[in-house]
Amino acid sequence: MGKPKDVLTTGQVAKICNVAPRTVSKWFDTGQLRGYRIPGSKDRRIPRQQLIRFMKAHGMPLEGMETGAVRVLVADPDEELLGVLRKTLEDDYSYDVRTASGTFEAGAVAESFRPHVIVLDVSFSDLDTKRLCRHVRTNPVLQETRLIATSGAMTDGQGQGYIQQGFDAYLKKPFEVRPLVTLIEEAGGNAE
């Protein structure tokens, strides 16, 4: 990776903050995020230092500023699987990975970590998948987050049902890491 850019576009800021570009434009237009317009154009530019100031003021993680790494949250009740996935995704693919072994913990981590992708075991007994999808899709902090459902007992029909509820993809357990990485790349690989 090269040197971080000193001035960013709204699209680049959107990827770093994991929000829609229109959200960044709104922050800019209301004066919350300082920057300037390119003369003779409507294009907005945000100086890197202004973005850092804004992110700190709003409690956003700055990890993505430095690395540009895709942020992945893996939520699964299997602690051993969490450890293996975290190590593999960090060491072999340079993702920024957080894990959670419960739904409450996953929600708390998602709010502060702002992942590009959430890999979620849908067999948690207290999980209401429809409500979860609705929450993610309507939360300004998570609206661009991609959801991948996993389960050992999932049929293709159930997987399609999760997609209809709002998930972006599904994987049946046990799965190899490569198909998961492919889904993460499709979902969040544009974080750079």
Image (spheres, rainbow, N blue to C red):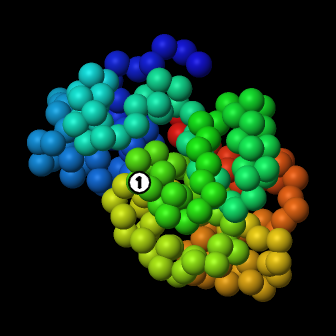
Vertical order, 74 against 4 (above or below): below
User: Quick one: quadrant of the N terminus?
Assistant: top right
* Residue 146 appears in the figure: no
Q: Amino acid at mark 1?
A: Glu
Q: Is residue 161 left or right of residue 81?
A: left
Residue found at the very far top of the displayed protein: 3
Vertical order, 35 against 175 (above or below): above
The local crowd at label 1, few if under 14, some if 14 to 19, many if 20 or more residues have their Cα within 10 Å, is some
Q: Residue at x 15, y 47 (%)?
A: 29
The residue that disc 1 covers is 111
| Element type where label 1 sits in the image | helix
Residue 121 picture location, percent across and down: 69, 66
Q: Residue at x 64, y 36 (%)?
A: 95
Tally the marks. 1
Residue 64 picture location, percent across and down: 47, 33
Residue 41 picture location, percent across and down: 22, 37
Q: Quadrant of residue 51?
A: top left
Q: Residue at x 54, y 15 (%)?
A: 2
Q: Nearer the viewer, residue 68 or 122?
A: 122
Vertical order, 61 against 158 (above or below): above
Q: Is residue 51 left or right of residue 1?
A: left
Q: Quadrant of residue 56?
A: top left
Residue 63 picture location, percent across and down: 47, 31
* Residue 65 appears in the figure: yes
Q: Nearer the viewer, residue 83 or 44?
A: 83
Q: Is residue 73 left or right of residue 132?
A: right
Residue found at the very far left of the displayed protein: 31
